[in-house]
Amino acid sequence: MISIVVPVYNSSSSLVALSQRIDAVFSQTIKKQYELIFVDDGSPDQRTWQTLISITSQNKNVKAIKLMRNFGQHSATLCGLKEASGDHIITMDDDLQHLPEDIPRLLEKKEHDIVIAQFANKQHSLFKRITSKAKGWFDYIIIGKPPGIQLSAFRLLSRNVVLGMLKIKTPYPFIPALMFHISKNIATIEATHMKRQEGKSSYSFFKLVKIFSNLIISNSSLLLKLIGVLGLSFSFISFILATHFIYKRFVYSSIPAGWTSIIVALLFLGGLILFTLGIIGEYLIRIITGVENKPTYYIREKIGCNEFS
């Protein structure tokens, strides 16, 4: 059994073709049993859910889930992973920029825990390519992405990796961080990235900022560590400056009384406070991580395959 998970957002125009092409790949090329799970991530356009109802009524291998509201692509993907029953699970986008015909290439390396599609020529805007490059550097620093690997939503995960990911409870999931935490047994394949046929990406500048903040805050303590380093640096600098001002106080009698002690105290205490906040923050991260139990998503409705019976 192979599961394909597709998070959906306002993409009614591409869903029929996507499901038909996936069905053709499995019936004609792979010849294995599969299930296709669409997760409607609170699409404002009601035609999206109506299209999914139509698809599930015509194809017994298709399931559809409607979330209560928009929780984001990573939460929707995690929902699909939880409902998937395949030995291997493939995730892909809903806009036909990922070719269903490339699925056999992913399955060729299914002995690995994680297989990620690499795109030589991404059909994205210049802004998105630039931000993707910047984020790739942070992925390497923060979540331990192996160097030379390009992240994409077109990937294959083993059942063991998915089960491990589902055990991690976080209200702000970031799929690459979860899967790299479980395994570093990664392979890549070359795939074709197509231009978007209709509409435009739902990732606005503010959504990209939100995803980046989830990466840097919810999946690491990098900012607090930087504050700690800055605090320690300022403490060292304040010590040097304090020595300098004390020296000037004794050499130059024209300096106003009390000025040196105030400056020295402000410099030293400011650095010490920043350093202390960083240490406290490290403890808070661990406390919050241990007590959070907020669901990542809420399901409104399930259809297809007898409602996943």
Image (cartoon, grey):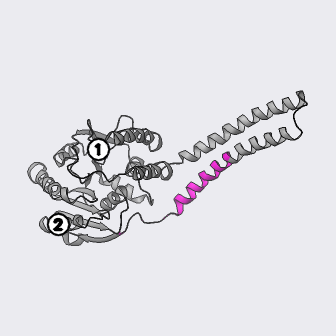
Task: Indicate whether residue 291 is drawn in magenta.
Answer: yes
| Left or right: 133 as drawn, with respect to 88 | right
Q: Tag 1, which secondary structure? A: strand
| Left or right: 141 as drawn, with respect to 27 | right
Q: Nearer the viewer, mark 2 or mark 1?
A: 2
Residue 43 position within the rendered picture, expressed as x and y whole percent measured from the top left: 29, 63
Query: Which residue is drawn at the image coordinates 80% and 30% (left, top)?
Result: 244
Residue 162 position within the rendered picture, expressed as x and y whole percent measured from the top left: 34, 55
Query: Which residue is drawn at the image coordinates 18% and 63% (left, top)?
Result: 62
Foreground: 98 or 256?
Answer: 256
Residue 72 position within the rendered picture, expressed as x and y whole percent measured from the top left: 37, 58
Q: Is residue 309 visible from the viewing direction of this image?
A: no
Disc 2 residue crowd, few under 14, some 14–19, many 20+, Cα 10 Å = many
The image quadrant that residue 105 belongs to is top left
Q: Tag 2, which secondary structure? A: helix
* 219 is higher (above) or lower (below) than 67: above
Indicate the amino acid at tag 1: Val
The C terminus lies in which quarter of the figure?
A: bottom left
State which region is magenta: 274-298
Q: Is residue 236 visible from the viewing direction of this image?
A: yes
Foreground: 216 or 155?
Answer: 216
Residue 284 position within the rendered picture, expressed as x and y whole percent measured from the top left: 59, 56
For label 1, the residue is: 115
For label 2, the residue is: 56
Query: Which residue is drawn at the image coordinates 71% and 35% (left, top)?
Result: 236
Query: Which residue is drawn at the image coordinates 50% and 63% (left, top)?
Result: 292
